[in-house]
Amino acid sequence: MAVRNPVDLIALILVIIGGLNWGLVGLFDYNLVDAIFGVGSTLSRIVYIIVGLAALYAIYFATRADTYHTREATTHH
């Protein structure tokens, strides 16, 4: 899966940040986003929304990448 444009890269970074935060919550019951921005604060909610949107974009990215590779494989044979 190759990152082709800045939006792809930003979404990837945000999804990684979200995954790491969930890992911290699961392992240590420590929420880094809440620690930085405050529990239930507007900024925390915005971060969660942006990470969630990045995850939705990652689904699109993954299906687009799969379609791209499938199309490329059929045109080069």
Image: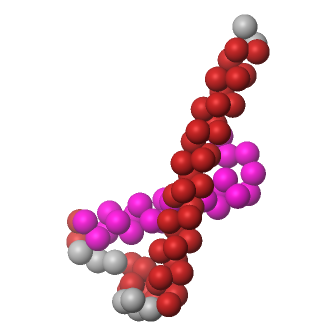
Give x and y (percent) for residue 46. Answer: 53, 81
Give x and y (percent) for residue 73. Answer: 68, 17
* On screen, residue 38 above or below 17: below
Give x and y (percent) for residue 61. Answer: 62, 46
Q: Quadrant of the C terminus?
A: top right
Is any atom of residue 13 visible in this view?
A: no
Q: Residue at x 40, y 63 (%)?
A: 20
18 or 52: nearer the viewer: 52
Residue 5 located left or right of residue 2: right
**Which stretch is magenta?**
1-26
On the image, which quarter does residue 24 sit in?
A: bottom left
Residue 34 located left or right of residue 74: left
Q: Residue at x 75, y 51 (%)?
A: 5
Q: Quadrant of the N terminus?
A: top right
Q: Residue at x 59, y 55 (%)?
A: 57
Q: Which residue is situated farthest in the top direction here?
A: 77
Residue 43 shown in magenta: no
Residue 25 located left or right of residue 76: left
* On screen, residue 68 above or below 29: above
24 or 40: nearer the viewer: 40
Is any atom of residue 15 visible in this view?
A: yes
Give x and y (percent) for residue 64. Answer: 65, 39
On the image, which quarter does residue 21 sit in?
A: bottom left
